[in-house]
Image: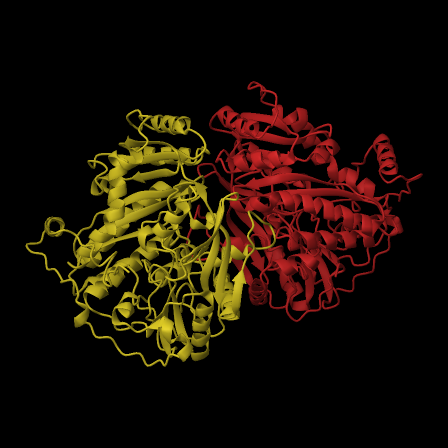
Chain colours: A red, B yellow
Amino acid sequence: MRKRKFWGWGYADELLSAEEEKNIDSRIAKTFKLDEVETLPIPDIKDIELPESSLLVPKNLRDIMSDDKEERLNHTYGKSFPDAARSVLKDFSSPPDFVAFPNTEEELINVMDWCDEKNIAVIPYGGGSSVCGGVETQVGDSYSGVISLDLRNLNQVIEIDRESRSARIQAGILGPDLEAILKKENLTLRHYPQSFEFSTLGGWIATRSGGHFATLYTHIDDFVESTRMVTPSGLLESRRLPGSGAGPSPDRLTIGSEGILGVITEASMRLQDRPTFRSSCSVEFTNYKNALNALRRISQSGLFPANCRLLDSNEALMNGAGDGSNHILILGFESADHDKSAALKRALDICSDNDGLYEEPDSNKQDAHRTGSSGNWRNSFIKAPYFRESFTRRGIIQDTFETSITWERAHSFIEEIKTDISKAIEKISGKPSLVTCRITHSYPDGLAPYFTFAAFAKTSTMIDVWREIKLATNEICISKGGTVTHHHAVGRDHRPNGYDNQRPELFKEILTAAKSRVDPNGIMNPGVLIDPENKNIYNWLK
Amino acid sequence: MRKRKFWGWGYADELLSAEEEKNIDSRIAKTFKLDEVETLPIPDIKDIELPESSLLVPKNLRDIMSDDKEERLNHTYGKSFPDAARSVLKDFSSPPDFVAFPNTEEELINVMDWCDEKNIAVIPYGGGSSVCGGVETQVGDSYSGVISLDLRNLNQVIEIDRESRSARIQAGILGPDLEAILKKENLTLRHYPQSFEFSTLGGWIATRSGGHFATLYTHIDDFVESTRMVTPSGLLESRRLPGSGAGPSPDRLTIGSEGILGVITEASMRLQDRPTFRSSCSVEFTNYKNALNALRRISQSGLFPANCRLLDSNEALMNGAGDGSNHILILGFESADHDKSAALKRALDICSDNDGLYEEPDSNKQDAHRTGSSGNWRNSFIKAPYFRESFTRRGIIQDTFETSITWERAHSFIEEIKTDISKAIEKISGKPSLVTCRITHSYPDGLAPYFTFAAFAKTSTMIDVWREIKLATNEICISKGGTVTHHHAVGRDHRPNGYDNQRPELFKEILTAAKSRVDPNGIMNPGVLIDPENKNIYNWLK
């Protein structure tokens, strides 16, 4: 197996080139007006000490439990900024006692039974790509230990139903492995979160992941036909149905439960035929209000573009999709059944009505989504996490946050967030920061803005600076009527100032009651979403 | 206020004509080979005795509580077959003690507080159109009384947001009243269940109602932006958001909760622009497998027809949409933004590929959905409940049941259900019965078949005969892998042999725990979906 980086994104052998690293230095020096840029080295596993596990693993579980140092390091954190920051600072004070790698659902149940009996916290782990503290093993002192439950060996496509375009799939499969298997049947799940390479089906479902489609099927939720979840009190499996009205949907409780009720082991997923018709175009707007208006009209038209992402001028500049003078709307239609050029034409007419400018799309250019503004954006999107970790080694916080809002509040909401968070970062970090925005998904009744910023800190202060900024971004999304997360999940990091104020108080009561019923000892992913009853849970952000 | 029929569908002054009644007699005589048809008279309110209420209403609630005899009769049952049957048999043995008509949410809360304190069961009542025992006031002997909580006075559109195409609406508004208000803004919810005239927004949400759109937006679920629910433990209100990934969706627990957690008092709903472009056509198939195949291919094409209903040949005959020799697919596209004739053409090409026959649609004929097969079907659909009650007065059970299934099982599922239920009815009732089928909604991964039958009984046996048939239809839908209801809700009638076996056992535990937390005394709609803890609930079907 190819080794993963325990301190950052991707595989251990995937590093930026010396030239790319040098470019980062000069970009940081220029942005923050610094004479020199201090850089922490890539941490060496030999320099890190881990506390020994005090748990005694029963005989029947020994083959599937690992206390290998690198595995424990790999499973201590997810991939958020503070996760990378603590890693390069060699702070691994709360690793899992063991990492479990069950090969079957039965083995997984055995692990959970043991943990339930011994009061050991269980952290479900898919690809480990959480950017909100969703897989962290620091759980406080109410447990006799903590294990990370890695689903990597439950990674099979069990059955494909070509007629219904549906497949029964194990939760631990990674994006590329899933797509490779589905491709043989000319099918695709077509769910491409930024983490695609290193995230799993189970993780997508547990966190309500947002993917490829900018309209209509924005979240993984829409592709879930049924789910199978192992809880400490047994199996919760729903029926495979295309649609139902029989009471509240059991799936819709499993979806987004972030491991607090149990571990998703399988799901039946709705698939797509692989698209053969593609029409795309980039449109430039000088006025942001006009751009939003065009986006709204397109989202309300019933045209359902697959790609419909609006980059503000600064975001376009940062990603090489524009020169910074205009806002850019990347529009793309796709179908496996029929030509979409008329749909694109209608969407472009809407853009024209709102003073959008574009070059006539070339209908023969089927790879347009991989070239031009669209292609630059795509490449930059995939590479972003690799760059981010190099910034982290220099104390610079490159981070994002995302939310959603209805149309009538959209313009002021976005402008105010950019201004207010920019000011907040200057106040917290002492240096100005540019906050840029892209719209990742849009709806007939609103849109999902995604903000990116870079904030100055030193490697010695970066974690504290980040924490203050996180509390500020959580707070602003909630106080202005948005959600604390549109598709990154809640985890532990979005709770203070955020989810804890967003969710209806009675819904917390309901979730807590549900959890107490299926996880009476509160061992499942403690501190994520809600606190289990009768436990003292630690949240380092509070 | 125009009076409603307490014993059947619609307004008290809406009766079939003498000729229509005569036609029913001869149709019954012919179908069941009878010499004469016994008919119960329309019940007279004077001939019905009601037990007196023993509840003492506190002073502050007296203005909004009614023990008017007709109101109590009106609120004893919904509109299922046994509801009409018991009504024409003058069996009103378990009426509500009082009917509450709160004018404000505050008054509604006062009513619920009183009921909670006094252990009085509360049956939320919207339009009262339930066909599954959802609003019945017979709750067993664990309560000191029972009230029907009628939302009719909470019927305002509070706010319309034209830009987001969304409105905040009180739950008690009836379909026609809502559409009349929205029409002024050129908007529509475009949710037309068969009960449209006599059902409410709150009822649609509480029961996961299925409406106008045959694909894509099949259930009311998809139009809910946020909900507000009064529970015995307080308010549960979600945020108005176009989309979110912040934990399991609170709305998706409210939607389909059928009054067991609380009463929905308001919702923000996603609206549509009123369509101006329409393209429709009817297609005939001689082979049912081909028809299903065409339907599947259209449902997987991404074309998203608004209307896409397949009537089997017998169903087409019954509804005047065909002569009984062919299966008929009614196809319709609509848009407020762009012409849909290319979409219709592509769908018709798919039909041709599957040996479907049609006349070229006339693109100038904008009212095609109101004429021809499509129009006949539409009229028959709206009139059906009026005819049904006249059959009931003759002991004849005209009833329907509906389910859903994935495509790979669809053909055998539908054929087996038609055959098996036909046989079951013959065995139960002593006379043969034809079971017909229409597909009301379809999905990329499956479809929702809706079955209609007429079964022979005498007015003295009709309730027992119906009960046996209901248990048989519940059982067959579940044992063959379907759902016990695709959009009629669970209520009390779909539980035995049905929902009680369908829902995952742990999900029942979760729902029960949730209910215990928000409704600790178990007063809310007892016996619907699940039984509350520590109460002895009566279900007359078991």
> How many numbered discs, if any?
0
Residue at x 79%, y 48% (from the top left corner)? A425
Q: Nearer the viewer, residue A71 or B335?
A: B335
Residue A132 position in % (x across, y down): 70, 51
- The image shows residue B528, relative to residue B18, as above or below, that is below
Q: Residue furthest front?
A: B184
- The image shows residue B233, relative to residue B187, as above or below, that is below
- On the rendered image, what quadrant is the C terminus of chain B found in? bottom left
Q: Is residue B436 left or right of residue A239?
A: left
Residue B452 position in % (x across, y down): 26, 49
Res A326 → quadrant: top right
- The image shows residue B46, relative to residue A9, as above or below, that is below
Q: Is residue B249 left or right of residue B539?
A: right
Res B216 → quadrant: top left
- On the rendered image, what quadrant is the N terminus of chain B found in? bottom left
Q: Is residue A363 left or right of residue B314?
A: right
Q: Is residue A237 among what the camera can see?
A: no
Residue B364 position in % (x across, y down): 32, 26
- The image shows residue B436, relative to residue B50, as above or below, that is above
